[in-house]
Image (spheres, helix red, strand yellow):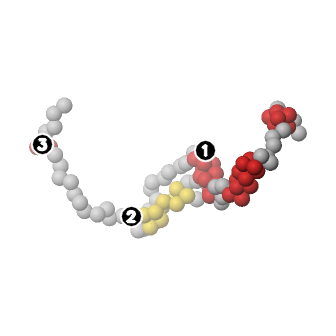
């Protein structure tokens, strides 16, 4: 394929006239607000999976990433030899027993 320089169109660096902001309503549909004068010709729909992932991300943002006190306590118990694991108890829980 050969590029024909006579058909090239100039690139404009003029700013885009209309800007707006897309927000999701409760059903996940996009609504446009901003300088467009309320014009809402474009629509976007998100899948249920995408909405669920967004909800999960919001929930994870509220959870502390690491419980430092617990980690330090377990680390100290392991280093001093005070932490013992009951293999039978672990096996029972892995097999779904209570």
- The residue shown at (18%, 49%) is 9
Along the line of sight, the residue nearer the viewer: 60 or 38: 60
> Alpha carbon of mark 3 to alpha carbon of mark 1: how far?
46 Å
Q: Is 37 situated left or right of 28 in this image?
A: left
* Of the image marks 2 and 1, the number of the one nearer the N terminus: 2
Identify which residue is drawn at 55% across, 54% down.
29
Q: Quadrant of the C terminus?
A: top right
What's the residue at 60%, 44% (across, down)? 49
Q: Residues within 10 Å of mark 2 (few under 14, many from 20)?
A: few
Question: Looking at the figure, which quarter contains the N terminus?
Answer: top left
Contact flag, marks 3 and 2 (Cβ < 8 Å):
no
Give x and y (percent) for residue 84: 81, 43
Q: Position of residue 43 (x, y in %)?
A: 48, 53
Whether residue 20 sits left or right of residue 75 in the image: it is: left
Circle 3: element type: helix
For the residue pair 54 and 14, the one nearer the viewer reads as: 54
* Residue named by callout 1: 49
Could you say which disc has been placed on residue 19 in the image?
2
Q: Earlier in the sequence, mark 3 or mark 1?
A: 3
The one nearer the camera, 26 or 82, is 82
């Amino acid at each position: 394929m050969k590029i024909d320089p006579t058909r090239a169109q100039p690139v404009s660096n003029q700013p885009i006239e209309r800007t707006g902001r897309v927000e999701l309503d409760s059903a996940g549909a996009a609504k446009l607000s901003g300088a467009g004068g309320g014009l809402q010709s474009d629509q976007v729909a998100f899948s249920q999976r995408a909405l669920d992932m967004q909800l999960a991300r919001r929930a994870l943002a509220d959870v502390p990433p690491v419980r430092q006190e617990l980690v330090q306590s377990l680390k100290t118990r392991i280093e001093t030899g005070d932490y013992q694991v009951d293999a039978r108890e672990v096996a029972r829980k892995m097999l779904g027993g209570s």
